Amino acid sequence: MLDRYLKPDFILGTYSEVTPEFCREHGITALICDIDNTLVTYDDPVPTEPVLAWYRKLKAAGIPISFVSNNEPERVFTFAAPLGVPAFPKCGKPSRRGVRAAMEAMESSPDGTVFLGDQLLTDVMSAKRSGIRAIVVPPIKDKKTLLFRAKRAIERPFMKKYMTEVCGGVSRG
């Protein structure tokens, strides 16, 4: 039962593996992204040069991006501003609210939209509850708070299981 909400469709090593070719191969026409620990660390207020380069490649391929985050509006809007993409803060993931708003803003359909994030309990669950596919990547640099350590401890056995099930390890589908 939990697999229905927690199992990602893809497990990749980093966000940069989501290329225009990967998207074409898997019928991805729109991308919803988490920010912190997925694209950058919590310490990066704006997109890094590698994130900007990645975004430009996807944009050139006609793949729109939006951000859905549980973080504060100032953080999310500051990060999204250089890219000029839709951004939705304080979404309460795993709520569906942010995913629905992002899809509406991008005019995307569930069958072509994918959520890219680093957490099963928020990002993947939000995607699955919204009827879209999910890509999970390892966190870039976790916070060391009790809440984050507890969430990662809960996720660890599921990730171990999914690493085997999703094509025997780090997978491209």
Image: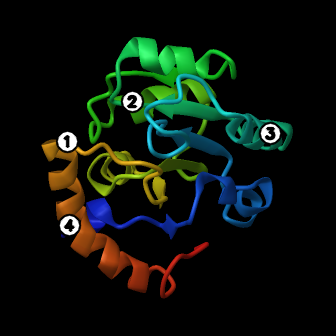
User: Where does residue 16 sit, x and y in percent of width and height?
Assistant: 67, 54
> What is the C-alpha distance between the residues marked 1 and 2?
25 Å
Q: Secondary structure at mark 1?
A: loop
Q: First in sequence: mark 3 or mark 1?
A: 3
The answer to whether the residues at label 4 and label 3 have Cβ atoms under 8 Å apart is: no
Quickly name the residue at label 4: 2
Nearer the camera: disc 3 or disc 1: 1
User: Where does residue 64 sit, x and y in percent of width and height?
Assistant: 69, 35
> What is the C-alpha distance between the residues marked 4 and 3?
34 Å
> What is the C-alpha distance between the residues marked 4 and 2?
21 Å
Q: First in sequence: mark 4 or mark 1?
A: 4
Quickly name the residue at label 3: 62
Q: Secondary structure at mark 4?
A: loop
The answer to whether the residues at label 3 and label 2 have Cβ atoms under 8 Å apart is: no
Quickly name the residue at label 2: 98
Which three-letter amino acid code belongs to the residue tagged 3?
Answer: Gly
User: Where does residue 56 sit, x and y in percent of width and height?
Assistant: 80, 36
